[in-house]
């Protein structure tokens, strides 16, 4: 949740406490949805603006970042194409005077930072890859969701006084895996109730904490059900996706601060793709989530390690994802 959304959320709650205030909380929530669409559009536009600014700077031969590039990569920049679409695994295509190119992944941090201390270029951008769990393993997805369905969601109608009944599992699975908002009345009502009770900020986390015992039970049963064949399939799928993404990131660029005023930068060479040999799945008894630790096959030739991560619902209670950091 962004700072602007936090402000709106607190403001809406405060307004409803004013005597004779003419707008209902539902109307204010509708206003907030419109505001969220505007902020999402704003931040998408902001990312595009950052890439455009970087392009303009790189095309300036006199700028330090351009000189540093030419010194490091022994190439002179002729042009820069902005990529960064969902089908791309990189942000900028840097074209050289000799017609060769470099596919560049860009990570920007608003706060001015000494980037020389960073060990990986994705450290300032949170993750190097974000994956949908259903694309990694149907078995893991089904086992986890069925356990959540049986141990958590079947108990929610009375607890949260829901008017809509729990939908059949197949519908539940389809809806809860959506990257956008759920469409089933049951999940839409549940999500609205959770936001009303716990607030828009971290309502999914607070929901799990309030039903920690139930989530732990689902987590434990899932971990116990994941056999070696399923683990091997997960490892293969993650390795395949990482290979596709890393091979398209030929170089990396970190920037921090205000690009039109004062900023720092750091160029990075190509990073060898991590090759995962095995994974260790455990239940996190503090959060009720599944933790994943990676055992790397090529650790000896890497200058970094993959941090332990966990499976989470990115949108509160839907959009099941795994972040590689």
Image (tube, helix red, strand yellow):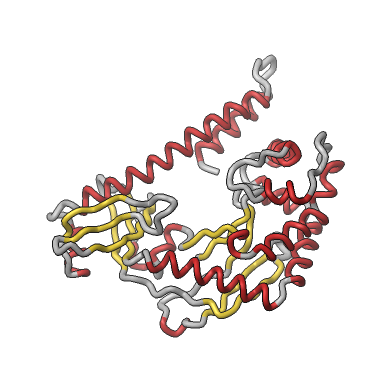
Residue 57 visible within the image: yes
Q: Based on the displayed image, in which of its 4 quarters is residue 49 positioned? A: top left
Horizontally, is 250 left or right of 22 in the view?
left
Residue 197 visible in the snapshot: no
Q: Position of residue 233 (x, y in %)?
A: 61, 72
The picture places residue 121, in percent across and down from the top left corner, at: 38, 64
Measuring from the top left, give residue 3's x and y in whole percent.
51, 40
Question: Please, is residue 182 above or below residue 306 in the view?
Answer: above
Give above or below for 49 relative to 133: above
Q: Residue 205: percent from the left, percent from the top?
A: 67, 51
Q: Nearer the viewer, residue 39 or 251?
A: 251
x 71%, y 39%: residue: 184
Q: Can you say whether 239 is above or below 90 in the image?
A: below
Question: Residue 8: which quarter of the image?
Answer: top right
In the image, what residue occupies the spot 63% across and 29% down? 29
**151 relative position to 298: left or right:** right
Work out whether residue 209 or residue 171 is closer to the camera in this orientation and state it. Answer: 171
232 sits to left or right of 259:
right
Where is the N terminus found, in terms of image quarters? top right
Q: Residue furthest right?
A: 158
Instruction: Please state the total of marks drawn on the protein image.
Output: 0
Going by the image, does 46 lie left or right of 134? Answer: left
In the image, 205 versus 300, the foreground residue is: 300
Please give the name of the residue rendered at 52% of the width and 65% of the height, measured from the top-left corner: 324
């Amino acid at each position: 949740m962004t700072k602007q959304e936090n402000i709106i959320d607190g403001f809406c709650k405060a307004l409803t406490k004013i005597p004779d205030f003419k707008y209902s909380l539902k109307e204010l929530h509708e206003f907030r949805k419109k505001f969220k669409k505007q902020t999402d559009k704003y931040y998408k536009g902001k990312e595009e603006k950052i890439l455009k600014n970087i392009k303009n700077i790189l095309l300036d031969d006199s700028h330090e970042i351009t000189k540093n590039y030419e010194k490091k990569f022994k190439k002179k920049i002729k042009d820069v194409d902005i990529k960064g679409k969902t089908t791309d695994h990189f942000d900028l295509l840097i074209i050289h005077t000799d017609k060769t190119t470099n596919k560049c992944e860009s990570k920007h941090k608003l706060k001015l930072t000494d980037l020389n201390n960073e060990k990986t270029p994705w450290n300032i951008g949170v993750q190097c890859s974000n994956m949908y769990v259903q694309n990694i393993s149907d078995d893991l997805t089904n086992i986890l969701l069925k356990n959540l369905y049986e141990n958590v969601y079947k108990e929610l109608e009375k607890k949260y006084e829901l008017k809509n009944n729990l939908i059949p599992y197949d519908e539940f699975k389809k809806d809860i895996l959506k990257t956008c908002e759920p469409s089933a009345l049951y999940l839409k009502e549940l999500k609205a109730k959770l936001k009303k009770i716990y607030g828009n900020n971290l309502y999914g986390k607070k929901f799990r904490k309030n039903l920690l015992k139930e989530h732990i039970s689902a987590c434990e049963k899932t971990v116990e059900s994941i056999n070696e064949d399923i683990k091997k399939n997960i490892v293969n799928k993650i390795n395949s996706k990482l290979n596709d993404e890393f091979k398209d990131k030929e170089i990396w660029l970190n920037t921090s601060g205000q690009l039109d005023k004062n900023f720092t930068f750091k160029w990075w060479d190509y990073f060898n793709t991590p090759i995962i040999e095995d994974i260790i799945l455990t239940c996190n008894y503090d959060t009720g989530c599944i933790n994943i630790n990676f055992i790397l096959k090529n650790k000896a030739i890497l200058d970094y390690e993959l941090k332990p991560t966990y499976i989470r619902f990115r949108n509160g209670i839907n959009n099941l994802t795994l972040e590689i950091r």
